[in-house]
Image: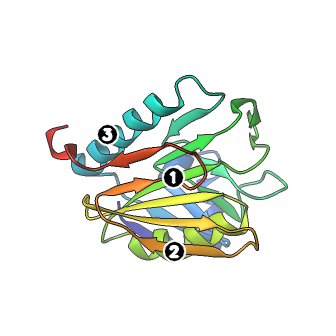
């Protein structure tokens, strides 16, 4: 998915329109390009594995849902559309957004959006208290970012397999994604 910066003065034009096609990070609006078939295939593959793991837990796996990350629940400063997120417990999801940050966010990184996902969104997610953030690179490898007990984020480059630090026993591999 690509992104293009739009001037803040233009954000008013987006109010009440298709919010799923933009993201706002630190007050900057990014127009999002449609995702590719390969991107969607990886998301479906990961969502299926996450849903299997969380099926008997008090958690919700959501794909492509807009997420307001500011305390005042407005979209002007921080509105993102993660590829996948896990919310535990699901009653934290309200019509105005989330009462607290998701426990896990997953983004499939492409060349056109890598700077946002690897830097800006990562910083935003960690500042807002997301416990674990996974990025999938080139449909082949994972990057894991975990918020430690001191509020610092640890970034780790992994291979085709990832194991959650937050959810014991949650282990996901990218093997077989090409068959989806």
Classify 10 Å Cα crowding around label 2: few (below 14), some (14-19), many (20 and above). some
| Nearer-the-camera pick, 169 or 104 | 169
Label 3, label 2: how many angstroms apart (C-alpha)? 23 Å
* Residue linked to disc 3: 45
Above or below, 176 against 118 in this view is above
- Residue 135 coordinates in the image, percent (x, y): 43, 62
Query: Which dot, 1 or 2, sits closer to the camera?
Result: 1
Residue at 58% across, 50% down: 104
Residue 70 image point, x, y percent: 77, 59
Question: Tag 2 or tag 1, which sits nearer the N-term?
Answer: 2
Q: Is residue 169 left or right of residue 14?
A: left
User: Which of 158/115 is in front?
Assistant: 158
Residue that label 1 marks: 164
- Within the image, what quadrant is residue 123 found in? bottom right
Q: Residue at the location (42% across, 46% down)? A: 171
Residue at image x 51%, y 74%? 155
């Amino acid at each position: 998915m690509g992104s293009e910066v739009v001037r803040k003065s233009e954000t008013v034009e987006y109010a009440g329109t298709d919010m799923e096609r933009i993201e706002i990070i630190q007050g900057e609006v990014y127009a999002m390009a449609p995702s590719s078939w390969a991107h969607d295939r990886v998301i479906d593959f990961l969502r299926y594995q996450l849903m299997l793991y969380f099926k008997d837990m008090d958690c919700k796996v959501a794909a492509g849902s807009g997420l307001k990350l500011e305390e005042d629940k407005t979209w002007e400063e921080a509105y993102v559309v993660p590829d996948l997120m896990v919310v535990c417990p699901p009653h934290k999801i309200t019509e105005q957004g989330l009462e607290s940050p998701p426990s896990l966010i997953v983004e499939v990184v492409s060349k056109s959006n890598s700077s946002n996902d690897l830097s800006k969104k990562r910083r935003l997610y960690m500042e807002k208290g997301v416990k674990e953030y996974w990025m999938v690179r080139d449909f082949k490898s994972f990057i894991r970012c975990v918020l430690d007990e001191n509020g610092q984020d640890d970034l780790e480059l992994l291979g085709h397999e990832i194991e959650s630090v937050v959810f014991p026993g949650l282990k996901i591999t990218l093997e077989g994604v090409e068959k989806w």
